[in-house]
Amino acid sequence: MKYENSYVAFLDVLGFKKLVFSKSKEDKKKIESYFEIVKSEISSLKTVDTKQDINYILISDSIIISIEQSQDETQKIENLRQLCIAVGKIQCKLALHNIWLRGAISSGETYIDSEEKQIVGAGYINAYLLEANHAIVPRVIIDNKIIYELELDSSDVLINKLNRTQHQYLFQWNWYGNHMIKIEKDIPLFINYFHNIENDDLLMVMNNIQENIYSDVTLYKKFKWVSDYLISYLYHKEKQLGSSMAYHEYIRLLETL
């Protein structure tokens, strides 16, 4: 077994057990959609040169995605960026189908064999434990230790290195002032999975939030966080593109939840 220093994402589907035990045809279809979407998105990503080195394992409600680090510091940042892009695309696509992910990305020596569905190593365990103990709501967080491993001074520096001018892959906390951020900064780094969402898809996500937020008292906190995260994003888009009646109305509706 050959271990490689890797970045590893461990992702978990919220409410999967309920879907499995449900007798509803709609829920059974949702499980089928989940597997189809993940496989399709990964296959599509692997056709892109920068993402060919991504490995993944899909078992029940768990998605594990891994990419080797590099000896070159610039390439190391690029590989982490590509993993974040892959995770964000899967998160957003599943959210459109009302399937919500929670997870974490960490680093460490890891052995992964996608064909045999085998994985072992510190990177995997670190990501698994972070997801279980700290992700809490539908988001994928990034291990703080990566900041120091990359010899950076702060989370803001890492965010700015990974993000591009038109693509905010990680949530940017200093968008036009913190007064527009509706979510608590309990975790400095998480995937900004709605960063490229368009109007039609935005309405679909809002409908999915409304469908879930009052369905169970234990779900309110989770989907209130998603609602507030989306509001924060819409404030940013509104400032970026100028006043938009549509965004203003979306924000108003979300704030009533």
Image: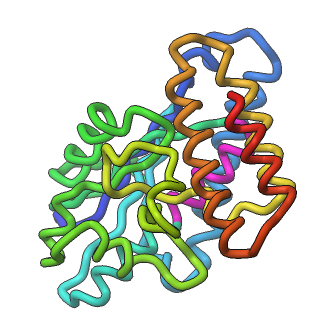
Q: Residue at x 18, y 86 (%)?
A: 71
Horizontal relation, residue 103 to residue 123: left or right? right
Residue 65: x and y in percent read 41, 56
Can residue 103 be spotted in the picture? yes
Q: Nearer the viewer, residue 222 or 23?
A: 222
| Residue extent of the magenta highlight | 86-98
Horizontal relation, residue 180 to residue 122: left or right? right
Please name the colour scheme applied to the rendered image.
rainbow
Residue 114: x and y in percent read 41, 56
Q: Nearer the viewer, residue 255 or 219?
A: 255
Q: Which quarter of the rendered picture does the C terminus lie within? A: top right
Q: Main secondary structure of the magenta part?
A: helix
Q: On screen, 67 above or below 216?
A: below
The answer to if 130 sits in the magenta stretch is no
Residue 153: x and y in percent read 16, 74
Q: On screen, 244 above or below 121?
A: below
Q: Nearer the viewer, residue 241 or 8?
A: 241
Q: Quadrant of residue 240?
A: bottom right
Q: Quadrant of residue 210?
A: top right
Q: Which quarter of the rendered picture does the N terminus lie within? A: bottom left
Q: Nearer the viewer, residue 9 or 28?
A: 9
The answer to if 91 sits in the magenta stretch is yes
Can residue 170 be spotted in the picture? no
Residue 203: x and y in percent read 82, 46
